[in-house]
Image (cartoon, helix red, strand yellow):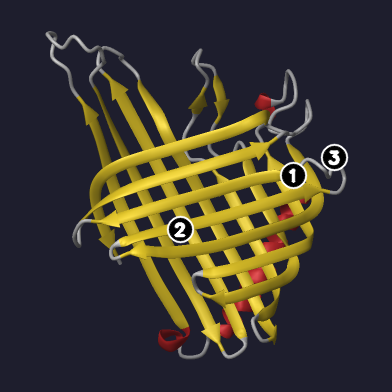
């Protein structure tokens, strides 16, 4: 609990420091934009269909919101991500979760020279709904696990579409409910514990490419090495989001995420979502 309180106190102080900067003309200093997407996937087969297959329907909700601040030699970029998806297979009484993410990224920088900034970053990740394994056993739920990362560093920012932040002194906190560690470790948290503290180095990169008219590719890469335990085992989290706009309200979206974290599982986790749906920018 002390570690959690320390993390919340740090974040609160960090946010208060930035709030002082916003007392000026917020209309000119802030840039805000967001996107809401609702994607649908559906397959149907009648009983005469000989090729095989099971009718199914799936839906995904996604919210991606950026609120960025710039005032002279100070920049503060923030991104909020929410994603949730369900699928239903004909004949199966239960629905299956296909996506579940809640994430906040915050990166503050003060210009040092040219395109280089002194920086401070904060990252929070968790999920909103219960996660089940193939046997229907609960393996996760809201705030279990929850990941916090923060630390000072150096930011290279070419523009709003290309940046890299390096933090050689990153604190990381993993939180899970104690009932997930009763019988053994869970998400890197040892048996009987409810949190794990790590200290290491992190690198985060962002690159958005406008491939052609109405087609954009957003890439986010996060690397982390824990100085305190097996620093050679680098955690990797890569996310790619492709948006192909058909018109103002319709788009096709492809989301791919690949994760390697040997504290959770010693294998690469891959998630892919594709759909056609309603898209609204704000």
Residue pictured at 33% horizontal, 64% vertical: 212
Residue pictured at 68% horizontal, 51% vertical: 223
Residue 134's place in the image compared with 118, above or below, is: above
Quarter of the image where one finds residue 19: bottom right
Task: Quarter of the image for the N terminus: give it.
Answer: top right
Q: Is residue 16 visible?
A: no
Q: CA distance from mark 1 to mark 3?
A: 9 Å
Count the numbered circles shown: 3
Residue 21's place in the image compared with 249, above or below, is: below
Q: Between tags 3 and 2, which lies in front?
A: 2
Q: Position of residue 25 (x, y in %)?
A: 46, 90
Q: CA distance from mark 2 to mark 1?
A: 23 Å
Badges 1 and 3: C-beta atoms under 8 Å apart? no
Please give the residue where the numbered disc 2 appears in the rendered image. Answer: 218
Per the rendering, the mark at residue 230 is: 3
Badges 3 and 2: C-beta atoms under 8 Å apart? no
Q: Earlier along the polypeptide chain: callout 3 or callout 2?
A: 2
Residue situated in front as seen by the camera: 250 or 28:
250
**Is the residue marked by circle 1 packed among few (<14), some (14-19), or many (20+) residues within 10 Å?**
some
Task: Quarter of the image for the C terminus: give it.
Answer: bottom left
Q: Position of residue 233 (x, y in %)?
A: 78, 40
Please give the residue where the numbered disc 1 appears in the rendered image. Answer: 234
Q: Is residue 13 left or right of residue 101?
A: right
Q: Regarding mark 1 in the picture, which secondary structure is present there?
A: loop
Q: Position of residue 58 (x, y in %)?
A: 29, 32
Q: CA distance from mark 3 to mark 2?
A: 31 Å
Q: Residue furthest front?
A: 212
Q: Regarding mark 2 in the picture, which secondary structure is present there?
A: strand
**Is the residue marked by circle 2 packed among few (<14), some (14-19), or many (20+) residues within 10 Å?**
some
Residue pictured at 67% horizontal, 66% vertical: 165
Q: Position of residue 154 (x, y in %)?
A: 73, 72
């Amino acid at each position: 609990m002390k570690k959690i309180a320390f993390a919340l106190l740090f974040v609160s102080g960090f946010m208060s420091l930035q709030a002082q900067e916003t007392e000026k003309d917020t209309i000119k200093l802030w840039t805000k934009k967001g996107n809401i997407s609702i994607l649908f996937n559906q397959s149907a087969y009648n009983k005469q269909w000989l090729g095989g297959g099971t009718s199914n329907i799936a839906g995904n909700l996604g919210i991606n919101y950026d609120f960025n601040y710039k005032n002279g030699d100070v920049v503060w970029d923030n991104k909020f991500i929410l994603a949730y998806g369900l699928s239903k297979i004909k004949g199966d009484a239960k629905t299956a979760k296909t996506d579940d993410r809640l994430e906040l990224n915050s990166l503050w920088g003060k210009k040092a020279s040219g395109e280089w900034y002194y920086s401070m970053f904060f990252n929070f990740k968790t999920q909103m709904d219960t996660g089940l394994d193939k046997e229907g056993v609960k393996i996760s739920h809201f705030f279990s696990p929850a990941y916090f990362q923060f630390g000072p560093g150096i930011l290279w920012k070419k523009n709003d579409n290309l940046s890299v932040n390096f933090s050689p002194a990153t604190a990381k906190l993993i939180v899970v409910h104690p009932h997930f560690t009763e019988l053994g470790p869970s998400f890197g948290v040892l048996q009987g514990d409810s949190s794990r503290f790590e200290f290491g180095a992190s690198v985060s990169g962002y690159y958005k490419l406008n491939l052609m008219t109405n087609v954009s590719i957003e890439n986010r890469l996060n690397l982390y090495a824990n100085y305190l335990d097996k620093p050679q085992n680098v955690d990797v989290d890569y996310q790619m989001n492709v948006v192909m706009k058909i018109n103002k309200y319709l788009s096709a979206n492809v989301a791919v995420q690949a994760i390697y974290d040997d504290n959770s599982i010693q294998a690469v986790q891959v998630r892919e979502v594709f759909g056609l749906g309603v898209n609204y920018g704000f």
